[in-house]
Amino acid sequence: MALTIRHNSIKTLQGAIPRGTPFDSHQLQELGVSSALSHHHLKSGWLERLGRGVFMFPKDILRREDSLKFLAASGEGFHVGGKTALAWRGIRHNLPTREPLSLWGESRVVLPPWFTDRFPARYTKRNLFSPKLPKGYGLQPLPETPHGVLVSEPERALLEMLSEVGVYQGVEEARNIMEGVRSLRTDTLATLLKRCERVKVRLLCISWAEELNLPWAAAARKAAGKSQDQSRWTARLKDGTVLNIKP
């Protein structure tokens, strides 16, 4: 009888949880798998432990999108942003295959090793925008995965990438990527620029857009307002390069 219960338990799990998806103790309990039974499944090789309270089916290959969605749903509030979001939305410039995922959030998060070992990623806790910006503004799942993880829309992703120039992001690559960002919703960009609290980001966005003759450059200049960013912004980057941005 006990053997039958255990076998049926595994069949239930395999039917309820798609392959390639991580799952946790709470999900197991909802499916009627007690702590004792999950411990037995681990010892028997029916489950594989990824981390504390996190599992997968043995010899499974985790899918990136499902793993991101699992982390986001388990309290690790974040979204895919910056250069990764631009690339996922079709705006890229020779993006390396193993380029780390750019994940963004408002709270301090430590990505678990089981995730980063499979999917190299960098988490950024940086508040670019004022609290007046509506929560979740400029964030939507990709059209092809409407129930997937939140991904920055191009207008927000661009500003996130510009914030990392001189930190994790090279100047030349950033300009090359930005040159391909030719179609932006000017109302969305204006809202984000008005609520952006980083002078460097606003100035880079406006100055480079004008230098690259992007169609939305004038709208970006107008959104920033005449009273803001009247001084030249200068910084020495990690590689020794001095970046001068005119107002």
Image (tube, helix red, strand yellow):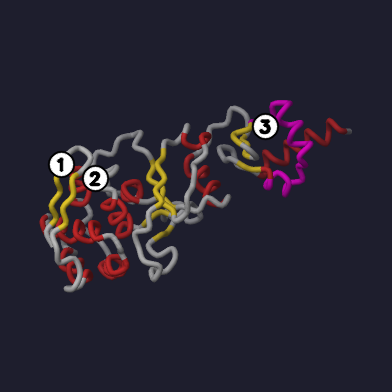
| Rendered location of residue 161, percent (x, y) | 29, 50
Image quadrant for the C terminus?
bottom left
**Counting other residues with Cα less than 10 Å from the Cα at mark 2, is it few (<14), some (14-19), or many (20 or more)?**
some
Magenta region includes residue 130: no
Residue 175 lies, in percent from the top left, at 18, 48
Looking at the picture, does residue 42 appear above or below residue 223?
above
Q: Which residue is mark 1?
A: 241
Q: Disc 3 marks which residue?
A: 47
Residue 204: quadrant of the picture:
bottom left
Label 3 or label 2, whichever lies nearer to me, is 2
Q: Earlier in the sequence, mark 3 or mark 2?
A: 3
Region of the chain picked out in magenta, as a range: 26-48
Nearest the eye: 8 or 101? 101
Asked if disc 1 and disc 2 are in contact, CB closer than 8 Å, the reply is: yes
- What number is the disc on residue 166? 2
x 73%, y 37%: residue = 11
Q: Quick check: 26 above or below 41?
A: below
Q: Is 75 located above or below residue 184 in the figure?
A: above
Which is the main secondary structure of the residues drawn in magenta? helix
